[in-house]
Amino acid sequence: MEHYQEKQEYILPVRILAGEQVEGEGELLRFRSDIASFCCEHPCRIRPGGWVLLDFGREYQGGVKLVAQDMMGKKNARVRIRFGESAMECCSELGQKGSTNDHSVRDETLLLPWAGCLEYGMTGYRFIRVDNAHVR
């Protein structure tokens, strides 16, 4: 009888490719606790309407884990997550340049807890774009 064992591994992006209205994005390249804390000295902040594009250096199959703390004055925030095998795909809107959610949902807006974790996605990607989709 064969035994199946699934292994889950968390990796960090290797570089920040681009971003707008974001500060502290370099902190996304360093390991931090995956437990929400209120004492993070150097958080990454993405302002409403802002975004950051992460490059993981090679293609992976999996998802993303976001850890949030004290967001939006103790309110949940909306984030838009986009996976892409290229930076262009990751930044395109659905229906543009062949980007779809047909074989996996690679573009989704989700509710991020104000003090907690969100894990999302199961797709092939090299790049992940995270937008603060909070409505001003």
Image: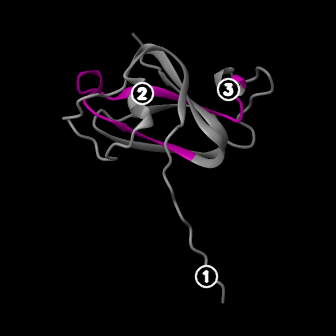
Asked whether 85 falls inside the magenta stretch, the response is yes
Identify the amino acid type marked 1. Answer: His
Precedes in sequence: disc 2 or disc 1:
1
51 versus 86 height, above or below: above
| Residue shown at 75% from the left, 38% from the top | 102
Q: Which residues are magenta?
A: 63-88
* Residue drawn at 75 percent across, 28 percent down: 99
Rendered image quadrant of residue 118: top left
User: Badge 1 local density, few (<14 within 10 Å), some, or many (20+)?
Assistant: few
Q: Is residue 100 left or right of residue 49?
A: right
User: Is residue 23 left or right of 119 when viewed as pictured?
Assistant: left
Q: Quadrant of the N terminus?
A: bottom right
Residue beneath label 1, please?
Answer: 3
Q: How many marks?
A: 3
Q: Which mark is residue 26?
A: 2
**Which one is closest to the eye, mark 1 or mark 3?**
3
Front-most of residues 27 and 39: 27
Instruction: Please tell me the numbered disc located at residue 87.
Output: 3
Task: Determine which of the numbered discs, if any, sits on residue 31 in the image.
Answer: none
Q: Position of residue 4 (x, y in %)?
A: 61, 76
Mark 2 vs mark 3: give the one in front.
Answer: 2
Task: Look at label 3 and name its amino acid.
Answer: Ala
Residue found at the very far right of the displayed protein: 98
